[in-house]
Image (cartoon, grey):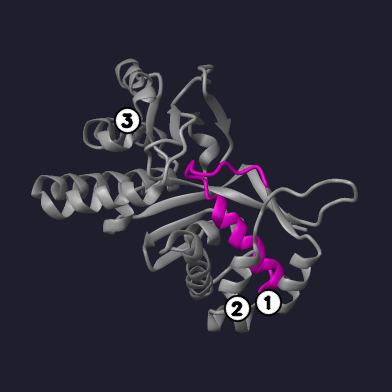
Amino acid sequence: MSKFYSKILLFGEYSIIKGSQGLAFPLKKFYGELKFPHVNTSKPEHNLSDFCQYISGRGILANLLDTDLFRSELEQGLYFDSNIPIGHGVGSSGALCASIFARYSKEFKRKKTYTQSELKYLQDLMALMESYYHGTSSGLDCLISLIDKPVFIRSRNDVESIEDLPKHKMGHFYLYETHIIRKTAPLVHTFLKDYDQSQQVREGVQRFSQLTNELILSLLQAKKTIFDELFSQISRFQYLNFETMICDNIKAFWLQGLESKEFFVKLCGAGGGGYYLVYSPNKALSYPNLTKIDL
């Protein structure tokens, strides 16, 4: 069966909720795939029966997916084998939903290009599926895993797949492992509460959104000097304004980057644990807890 990769929201965390653009990539370092257990081996504990029941009770999903086959294969021991870290902001449930949709869909086939209307349709279906795990979902994590392409998010309802990005002209990207599992919902709740209650926060988010949009544009246009400067500005802005989302065990490293300008750190998704994104404009890094990633 096919592999479905994790994802990384490169830019747009939090600001995308309030209308900024976003840029997300499949992260090929981690993946999951549906499997049947081998003889004389015990399968991991992945209970998909309740998920199958959930899909069966959602009219549009039940019509589009072959739930009878899904149920039959579960009885044969089907499970989701994954090395995607849970609670790290790289889309573990998104890859699971994408793998199930692709296997049991009566009409979907992966292809090289998608129209915007096709992407919006798939995103809505993915959102409905992943809501089983998160209560609510944008569907973006699942969509990226499903189509296995970078996605440019102009707005929450306007996404476009990207074929060629000049990322090879940029510097080096890394994930910083905090070894802390976190949950997204409480962090987003705090952000929205602060946004609603403070004019200063709203003005800061507006500035952050502007920086995010400019940063994405500089990457799309391969303007490295501008990209490097904007990345450093976002790193500084988050260090000063997103304290709740920054783990204690990365603060000194984050500040070291800002002061030395050797590298810059930013949130990777909601923050609060899991992975953080590190960017080095020029030289390769060799610090503890860092893993180089290829976008």
Q: Residues in magenta?
A: 82-110
Q: CA distance from mark 1 to mark 3?
A: 48 Å
| Residue denoted by label 1 | 67
Q: CA distance from mark 2 to mark 1?
A: 6 Å
Instruction: State yes or no: discs 2 and 3 in contact (Cβ < 8 Å).
Output: no
**Camera sees residue 110:** no
Q: Position of residue 24 (x, y in %)?
A: 48, 50
Instruction: State yes or no: discs 2 and 1 in contact (Cβ < 8 Å).
Output: yes
For the residue pair 197 and 141, the one nearer the viewer reads as 197
Q: Position of residue 187 (x, y in %)?
A: 32, 46
Look at the numbered disc 2 and give the secondary structure of its residue.
helix
Q: Quick one: label 1 or label 3, which is nearer the N terminus?
A: 1
Q: Is residue 69 magenta?
A: no
Q: Residue at x 67, y 79 (%)?
A: 107
Q: Residue at x 23, y 53 (%)?
A: 192
User: Looking at numbered disc 1 in the image, what kind of residue is underneath it?
Assistant: Thr
As drawn, which residue projects farthest toward the right? 39
Look at the numbered disc 1 and give the secondary structure of its residue.
helix
User: Looking at numbered disc 2 in the image, what kind of residue is underneath it?
Assistant: Ser
Q: Residue at x 29, y 51 (%)?
A: 15
Q: Quick one: label 2 or label 3, which is nearer the N terminus?
A: 2
| Residue denoted by label 3 | 232
Q: Position of residue 28 (x, y in %)?
A: 63, 44
Look at discs 2 and 3 and give the one toward the viewer: 2
**Left or right for 28, reference 178:** right
Q: Quick one: label 2 or label 1, which is nearer the N terminus?
A: 2
Q: Which mark is residue 4?
A: none
Q: Is residue 87 magenta?
A: yes
| Residue denoted by label 2 | 56
**Camera sees residue 43:** yes
